[in-house]
Amino acid sequence: MLKVLGSAWALLLGICLLMVGNGMQGTMLGIRGGLEGFDTFEMSIVMSAYFVGFLGGSRMAPGMIRRVGHVRVFAALASLISAVMILYPTFPNVIAWSLGRVLIGFCFSAVYVTGESWLNNAATNENRGQALSLYMIVQTLGIVLAQALLLTADPSGFILFIIPSVLVSIAVTPILLSISPTPAFETTKPMTLRQIVAFSPLGCVGMFLLGGVFSAQFGMASVYGAVAGLSVAQISTFVATFFIGAVFLQFPIGWISDRMDRRFLIMITSLIGAAGSVLGMFMGHIFPLLLTSAFIVGGMANPLYSLLIAHTNDFLEHEDMAAASGGLIFINGLGAIAGPIITGWLMSTTLGPGGFYLFTGVLFVSLAGYAGFRSTRGRTIAVEDTGSYVAIYPAATAVALEIAQEYAIESDLEEAENTEDQDTQK
């Protein structure tokens, strides 16, 4: 891992700074929206707009990179992100913020595609898994650091918009000065949605539902905190706890997933996530219990993303895994767009802040129920025949998911060779 860090430190540092900037602007808007007098439903539209742009960027970025190259795409879009962040406090109205969020979502998606393609080019068969793990750790660390930086200035001023703008601008420097600008760039043509659904109905339904959970967690957690009357320090801690839970529980759940029926584990993990939502809904007024609920929800939602991908891969041939990636991300993106709007509508009713956890709880229960249903109807695959679980962050683009698929294939082939060698020795 140290070798990977030594060769790709500039890229990882740049990605970390980008994630800090993204995490700050998302949480900051939730806090500032309340100060500007936006109601909950208006803020849900603003938050949903990011995922509209992100989904569009993930579809269009490959063509942009092929036309003008990695360097121009990365530098131009990072500059645009920096500019939009500065403009947020200048035009405090719903339409301007929503358009800004669409633009920033589009730009971040394309920037991530560019960075991930550089990462793929730098990785080898021997260290691809380590590179992917470092990438995920850096992403999560950036989000957590972003919440700490929110405590450095008054949210009613301009400083907390200037900081992420500067960080995004700085992020470009180490990447463009130290990395080869022209890695090979190819993306696999995605499967049709009908084909993916035929292979894995649970994978598709689960990715859609989980898109709603993740977008509520990433987009509406700060709005929840503002509506619930939490202080800025409490909101930043609350948002960070979702991602801390993801870091601590991702790998234990992954280890378990390689040793038991994945549909059953998806059901159990979803039920635990639902229990965390119930805790937050009824005991959220007690801050330590609110943090416990965030830890559980984040700790279940992020591993579920990787679990659903691994489960879908169990029904695919190796050559089809990369093609399925784009379709799965598209399905997840559709759920992500709807998530903040539904959450905002629930929170704007008599449910108040509790609508946030009601939404995530219903989605978790729905996923658990469908996983249980599919375990009685779907084709069963023996544990020893399942593919490898690879941890992946839910906001990753198709490029990162294809890297994960390549690593999973390599791990499966290596395990098969080792098993064959052991049988031969016997």
Image (tube, rainbow, N blue to C red):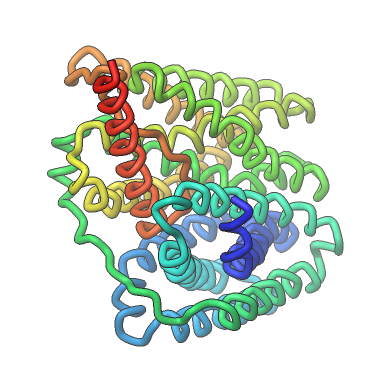
Tell me what residue is drawn at x 64 percent, y 21 percent: 279
Query: Which residue of the protein is positioned furthest toward the top in this rendering?
Result: 376
Q: Nearer the viewer, residue 253 or 194?
A: 253
Give the residue drawn at x 78%, y 27%.
288
Q: Residue at x 35, y 57 (%)?
A: 398
Confirm whether residue 379 shows in the render. yes
Q: Position of residue 32 (x, y in %)?
A: 72, 60
Residue 172 placed where, x, y %?
A: 60, 78
In the depicted structure, whether residue 347 falls above or below residue 86? above
Image quadrant where residue 42 sits: bottom right
Residue 13, percent across and down? 65, 65
114 sits to left or right of 141: left
Query: Is 146 rendered above or below residue 290?
Result: below
Q: Foreground residue, 269 or 339? A: 269
Judge from the rendering whether residue 357 lies leftward or rightward of residue 164; answer left or right.
left
Quadrant where the C terminus sits is top left
Q: Is residue 37 visible?
A: no
The number of discs equals 0
**Which residue corresponds to the image point at 33% horizontal and 47% vertical from the top-left?**
405
Q: Nearer the viewer, residue 164 or 225?
A: 164
Q: Quadrant of residue 245?
A: top right
